[in-house]
Structures are given as structure tokens and as C-alpha cells.
Amino acid sequence: MQHFGHDGFDLAYMDCGTGDPVLLIHGFASNARVNWEAPGWISTLNEAGYRTIAIDNRGHGHSAKSHDPKDYHPTAMAGDALALLDHLGLERAHVMGYSMGARISAFAALQAQYRVRSLVFGGLGDGMVKGVGDWDPIADALLAPDPAAITHVRGAAFRKFADQTKSDRLALAACIQTSRDLVTPQDLRLLTMPVLVAAGSLDDISGDVFALAALMPDAGGFVIEGRDHMMAVGDRSFKKAVLAFLARVRS
């Protein structure tokens, strides 16, 4: 991991390969290695001729942690992602985010459309505009003294994931409070670059990929068959769809 500073945070990132740059933004409670390296995304994109730049969002992975919810609005994390492009001297990049990372990607594109060549929203459909349900029990699960006592199914799953990734649970509990700011349909209509929206057919978090795609001028949806929110990330058909999408944009 390499590091740079922005907005008072020391932020970690990976930079691998050569070619057209693809900025990768991971999901809640994950990190660059878990979301992108372990499932084979970095090697897949490198082999296809792309340079991959994967950031550890503030509060996650090897980046600095805050326990203050005000630090985790998507606009702030989008600013970190754009600052990484500045740090690397890159004017434009393809941007791909998963789940919370998809939301951050949307805010980054709205802040600086000219810097985003294309967008991939993974693991988040029209939940980006409608919301993705009640996540307060997840914050409670992250703060619970005894994980065995957690009865909320989704909360238990995220607590297990946070423990597996050795995350700072106080930082994640702060993040979950403010990182779910919604994107308006009016704002999405401003995103004129090519967009691919993809989520698993068994994903009960993301919402409808085609409904989200319909809100943007140049967007399409892709369903990752037989996969839920966690298992869709490294799916082979998802990788194939993204490579085909990037090839169309590049050509």
C-alpha cells in the first residue's frame, strides 16, 4: 500500500499495472484488498490492459480512522477519491464502485464530471435514490460487546465481516450513520458518461439495477445471476460484463 494525505486523513491506496486508469472504490466495512485484490479484479483488469488504482476509504483498511460521523458523508469520501487522482497526476479515469463505493462514485462524478470517463455501479441499484433500508441495527451490531448475542441477521453478517477484516468497529459504526446520503434523480440525469449498473439477482440490499439505469442518459443494467450482495463481487460474469463495457467505452 502507498499513502497520501487529504482533508486531514492519511489515505492508503494500491496502484497496479499500466494503461487506461480505473479507480476502484470499495464498499462498507471492506477495503481495497478484500474488495478488489482477493476476488481477482485487479489481476483481471491489469491483464486486460488497464491500470488499477484502489483506495482504502477513510475509516477502512490501512487509511486513517475517525469516530466522528460527520467525516463520512459520501461527498467527503468522493473528495478523497478525486484527490487521489490529483496525487497521481491523472486528469481522467474510469471509476468503479461497489455498494457504498458505488454511492461514493456517483458523488465523485457529480463533483467533477469531466474527470470520470465512465462509471460502474456494482451492488447498488435504485437504492441509491430510494435508500437501502434500516441500517441502525448494523451500527448496534458493530458496537455489541458480544457478537453471539446479535439477533439481527444482516447486523450479524456485517459484524462477522468487520471482525474478519480486523476493522475498527467504532469507525464503521460512525460511517454507517452518514455514508448513506441519497442521490437525487435530478442529479443522476446530469451524469452523461457511459454507466453500467450491476447487482446480484439475490441481492436484497441494492434495489433495481434497471430502474437506476433508466435515470441516466447513457446507462444499462446487468443482473449477476444467483448471487447475493456479498457473493456478487467476484463473480465471473460480472467481470466479463465490466470488461465488455470498458472495451465499448475505450473504442
Image (cartoon, rainbow, N blue to C red):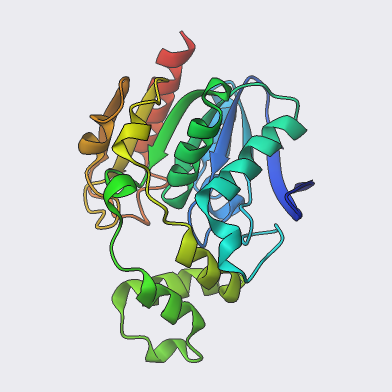
Determine if residue 227 is in view.
Answer: yes
Q: Nearer the viewer, residue 230 or 212?
A: 212
Outermost residue toward the front in this view: 186
User: For this view, does 230 lie left or right of residue 64?
Assistant: left
Question: What residue is at 31 percent from the left and 85 percent from the top?
Answer: 151
Query: Which residue appears at 63% of the width and 35% of the height?
Result: 82
Image location of residue 12, percent across then percent down: 72, 50
Quarter occupied by residue 21:
top right
Q: Is residue 165 visible?
A: no
- Residue 93 to residue 138: above or below: above
Q: Quadrant of residue 249?
A: top left
Residue located 69% across and 37% down the image: 83
Q: Position of residue 124 (x, y in %)?
A: 34, 46
**Nearer-the-camera pick, 108 or 247:** 108
Residue 94 placed where, x, y %? 53, 26
Position of 38 with respect to 8 (left or right) is: left
**How many numbered marks are there?**
0
Left or right placement of residue 207 versus residue 139 in this view = left
Q: Is residue 176 above or below residue 152?
A: above
Q: Quadrant of residue 85?
A: top right
Determine the residue positioned at 43% across, 81% down. Answer: 140
Q: Residue most toward the top?
A: 251
Residue 242 percent across, percent down from the top left: 40, 29
Q: Nearer the viewer, residue 5 or 47?
A: 5
Does 219 sit left or right of 161 as displayed?
left
Is 146 placed above or below 78 here?
A: below
